[in-house]
Image (tube, rainbow, N blue to C red):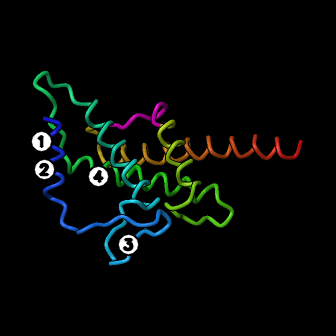
Amino acid sequence: MYEQVILIAMSQASAKVAEGKPWDDVSGNGSPNLGSYEYQAILSVVELAHELIFFSIDDDKGPAVDLAKVRSLARTLLRACDNVQAAVRPDHRISRMDNSHTRARGAVREALRAFPVPFGADEATRSQWEANLTSQATALMTMALDIFSGEIAA
């Protein structure tokens, strides 16, 4: 079943892609760069969304993951990661190419332990969950930054 989902997703891919230097988001021919840091960032969030949905399904026959739900959750999680990164950077800039975004993704993943995805919830509940998730992840990154700053000053 899982292999079928991958094959379906691959057959739906419409863009011709290439791989280039990781700091370039597009390759020399203008196609998406599968080797870019930004693609890696997005892929890690898509994989996380897939994992969260996959393990939320209770089906003895083998779960079928709705890829539209994966896309929606991935976009929400990516937005949370972007907001966490912006909150802790002095310039409030979002760059999925930067290591601070990698750290933000880790903080969001950790914050999911305290604020699990409210599957089946209404829009208001999902919006509050996203705000709580983002706040918790931001607090984790801020705490680490405070500890790190103290260590440097000591």
Mark whose residue sits in front, 2 or 3: 3
Helix, strand or loop at mark 1: helix
Residue under circle 2?
A: 8
Mark whose residue sits in front, 3 or 4: 3
Indicate left or right for 83 with 14 as reference: right
| Residue 151 image label | none
> Residue 48, percent across and down?
36, 42
Query: From which residue to which does the magenta span run?
Result: 112-118
What residue do we see at 15% from left, 43% from top? Answer: 5
Cα–Cα gap, marks 2 and 3: 25 Å
Cα–Cα gap, marks 3 and 1: 29 Å
| Three-letter code for the amino acid on which mark 1 is drawn | Gln
Instruction: Note whether 138 is above or below 28 in the view shown.
Output: above
Q: Is residue 63 magenta?
A: no
Cα–Cα gap, marks 3 and 4: 27 Å
- Mark 1 and mark 2 residues within 8 Å of each other at the beta carbon: yes
Q: Is residue 113 magenta?
A: yes
Mark whose residue sits in front, 2 or 4: 2
Which residue is more in the foreground, 77 or 34?
34
Give the quadrant of the C terminus. top right
Cα–Cα gap, marks 4 and 1: 20 Å
Residue under circle 3?
A: 27
Indicate left or right for 95 with 76 as reference: right
What residue do we see at 23% from left, 69% from top? Answer: 16
Q: Quadrant of residue 17?
A: bottom left
- Mark 4 and mark 1 residues within 8 Å of each other at the beta carbon: no
Helix, strand or loop at mark 3: loop
| Three-letter code for the amino acid on which mark 2 is drawn | Ile
